[in-house]
Image (tube, rainbow, N blue to C red):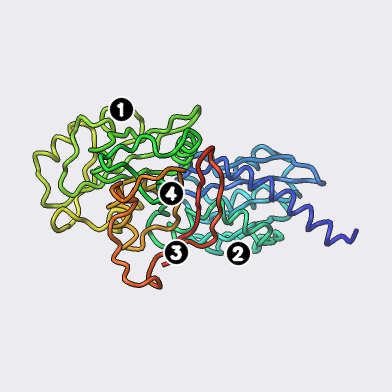
Amino acid sequence: MPARRLRSEEDARFMARAVVLARRGVGRTSPNPPVGAVVVRDGRVVGEGWHRRAGGPHAEVVALRCAGKAARGATLYVTLEPCSHFGRTPPCARAVIASGVARVVVAVGDPNPRVRGRGLRALRAAGIGVDVGVMAAEAGEVSAWFRHCVVHRRPYVLLKLAASLDGRIATADGESRWVSGVAARRWVHRLRNRVDAVMVGAGTVLADDPALTCRIRGGRDPRRVVVDGRLRVSPRAAIFRRRSVAPTLVATTVSASPRRRRALERAGAEVLVFPGRNGRLRIGAVLAALAVRGIVSVLIEGGGDLAAAALRERAIDRVLLVSAPLLLGGDGRATLGALGVRRLAGAPRLTRVTVTRLGRDLLWDGAVQY
C-alpha cells in the first residue's frame, strides 16, 4: 500500500477517535467549543482527552499531559484549531509547541477572530508539520453550534414541536399531555441534556406548568428561559419551585409591572428587561443577550406564538417536529401562530431532512431555509 494512502487512512482513523471524544463535551463546554484530541506515536495512541467544561484544561492539554514524554516526536490529532490567545486558560498552541510533537493534524479551523489561523501559523512557525481538513465534516458537525454563535453572535436555535398528524398540539379544551409517546419524551430529555438553554413562552408555563429539567441519569439541567412580555407567570410556577442548579431567566418588556418583577426575583429568577410594545419583544434581542451570557445553543419548546415569532424573525436554525399518529381536528390548537405567509414561495422550508422513528411517533429533523 502506498505510504501516502496508508497515512491518509491512519489520519482518518485517529481523527475519528478524536471526534468521538469531542462529542462527550457537547452541552458542557459553552461558551467554548467541544473538542477532542489524540496523541499517536508509532501508530499507537499514547494520550487522549476532550474539553470537559469551560474554565477547565482544553482537549490538547489533557491529551498531551496523558502522553507525557511520549508526545515528543508524536502526532497530535485535534478536531479544532488550537487556540493562540489567553482566556480562562493559557494558549493551547504554546502547550503543543512545548510538548515537542512533530506533526499536528487539525480537522477544522477556529472561526473565532481571536484565533482564526493564528494557532496554525504559530505551530508552523515553530517547525511543526500541520495538516488541516481531515474529517472536517464530522468534526465540524460537533462544533457547529459554537461556530454559528461566533459567526452570527447569537445562539444556535432549535425548535422542538410535537403535534398530531393534522398539526395540532392540543385538543380544543387545551389538553396536550401527552400528544407524543414515551420514546419521544425520553428523546426530549436527552436533547435538554445537550443544549445550554430551554426557552418557552408565558402561555406554556401557564397551561402546562413545566419544570423544564433533564430527567435522565447523569444528565444536567439546561438554563430555563421564559419569554413573558407582560409578566403573567406566577412566582409559584414549577419552573421556579423545582430545585435545580440551572438558573431561570425571564425576558420581559420595560412596561411590565415592577411589582411582578420583584416577585419573580424573590422566587429566584433573573429578570431581563427589553424594549417592547404591547407586551411583545424581539426574540433576536433576547438571543443576543443570552449569547453574552455564554449560551451557545437554545431549544425552543413552546408555545405556538413564541415559535411563530422566532420564525418570523428568522431566528430558528433547525426544526425538530415529532409527528404523533393522532387526529385532533380543526378545533384543536394549532402548532404555530401566524407567520404571515402569503405565497408558498415565501414559506420557510426544511432542508437536509431526516426522518427517524421514536416509538409510535416520527421525528422530522431539518435545517430551516428562509
**Cα gap from disc 3 to disc 4, whole angstroms:** 18 Å
Choose the circle earlier in sequence order: 1 or 4. 4
Q: Quadrant of the N terminus?
A: bottom right
Q: Position of residue 193 (x, y in %)?
A: 46, 38
Which of discs 2 and 3 lies nearer the camera? The answer is 3
At 69% from the left and 40% from the top, the residue drawn is: 47
- Label number found at residue 242: 1
**Cα gap from disc 3 to disc 1, whole angstroms:** 37 Å
What residue sits right under mark 2 in the picture? 121
Amino acid at dot 2 = Arg
In this figure, what is the number of numbered marks? 4
- Label number found at residue 349: 3
Rendered position, 154 above or below 220:
below
Which of discs 3 and 1 lies nearer the camera? The answer is 3
**Cα gap from disc 1 to disc 2, whole angstroms:** 49 Å
Residue 114 left/right relative to 173: right
Bin the neighbour count of mark 3 within 10 Å (Cα to Cα): few under 14, some 14-19, many 20 and up.
few
- Label number found at residue 280: none
Choose the circle earlier in sequence order: 3 or 4. 4
Bin the neighbour count of mark 1 within 10 Å (Cα to Cα): few under 14, some 14-19, many 20 and up.
few
Decide: marks 1, 2 in contact (CB < 8 A)?
Answer: no
Q: Nearer the viewer, residue 14 or 68?
A: 14
Which of discs 1 and 2 lies nearer the camera? The answer is 1
Bin the neighbour count of mark 2 within 10 Å (Cα to Cα): few under 14, some 14-19, many 20 and up.
some
Residue 143 left/right relative to 195: right
At 81% from the left and 57% from the top, the residue drawn is: 7
**Cα gap from disc 2 to disc 3, whole angstroms:** 40 Å
What residue sits right under mark 4 in the picture? 165
Amino acid at dot 4 = Leu
At 60% from the left and 64% from the top, the residue drawn is: 121
